[in-house]
Image (cartoon, rainbow, N blue to C red):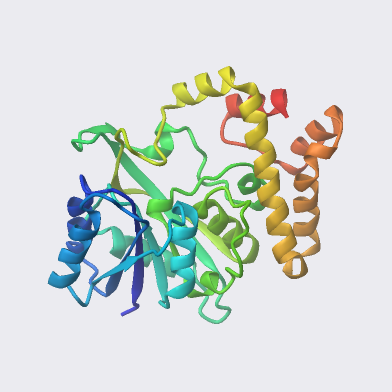
Amino acid sequence: MDNICIIMATYNGEEFLEDQITSILENTYRDFVLHIYDDGSTDRTLEIIRSFAEQYPSQVVCHQNRANKGVILNFLQAVEELDADYYMLCDQDDIWLKRKIEKTLNYIRTLEDPARKLPVVVFGDAKVVNENLSVQADSFQKQSKYHPEHTDLAHLLMENKLLGCTIMFNRALKKKLYRFPPQIRMHDWWLGLVGTVFGTVGYLNEPLLLYRQHGTNIIGNPSYKDYIKNRTAQIERLQDILYRTCNQAEAFLALYEEELSKEQRTILHAFVTLPEQNWFVRRFRIIKYGFYKSGLIRNIGVLLVI
């Protein structure tokens, strides 16, 4: 059996943490170790983690960060220091369905080429629930009106489609994680970019966890209606987000340029230099290279504000 590192990042998560850890331990696939990295909690989070680590010493490991890293570095630096065949990422407040690990592992194996050992990352869907686990939407992807099947470089430069708590990736992808520049917008987005450039990104079209939404989510799931309302009301903020997305791409290009194909360098350079171009060229490049988000309304918004 392949061994799997499940990495959970915690911070003041006492309210839902026990349910989440229990749901992982009840999964059908057993050859995993859950590494929990606490980022300076001041509530009972560490006490809960240590209790599980004592009860399940071969499957639960408690790590306490010396200084607060923030969610991105907490995940990525944990990946850097752990060795496994496969890696999964995990939030502190969701519920994993019993066959989540098994089904995700089976899927990633279908995309791997053992002879070439290419990087592969897969992601999936989730049921959106409230704090009491009442289902609010049967599909996170459909509720958000994403097009998760569009995982080529041009699409992923413009929009992150990977829901971090559904991700699994292999050792070959981990080996491509050289550094973590401060321009990274989200850890799952960065993993998706590495996967699509050097290997494969796959979408498992099945909800395998309950994605809990509550008042203290670091990253929540606003409805599509709220997304449009917020973006319309904050044009300057949207422009800033788009340019920070270009900065992330610039950091990616600087880090991996020598390993890219000519076509990949061309696409990345065209995206990175968007802010420097005039009104016409910016829009021409978006259309020429397919720097699109999911859905007509999002793309109209991009063309209006960029």
Q: Is residue 62 visible?
A: yes
Q: Quadrant of the N terminus?
A: bottom left
Is 228 on the left or on the right of 291, as rendered? left
Q: Residue at x 71, y 65 (%)?
A: 256
Query: Of 57 and 256, which appears nearest the observer?
Result: 57
Identity of the residue drawn at 45% across and 22% down: 226
Answer with left or right where residue 293 lies relative to residue 61: right
Image quadrant in which you'd find residue 87:
bottom left
Q: Is residue 42 above or below residue 233?
A: below
Give the total of numbered labels: 0
**Which sits in the foreground, 61 or 225?**
61
Residue 254 image point, x, y percent: 74, 61
Residue 51 placement (x, y as % from top left)? 15, 64
Asked if residue 203 shows in the view, the reply is: no
Q: Is 260 on the left or on the right of 14, as rendered?
A: right
Q: Residue at x 40, y 32 (%)?
A: 143
Picture coordinates of residue 146, whole percent (x, y) = 50, 37
Q: Is residue 54 above or below residue 107?
A: below
Q: Position of residue 283 (x, y in %)?
A: 79, 31
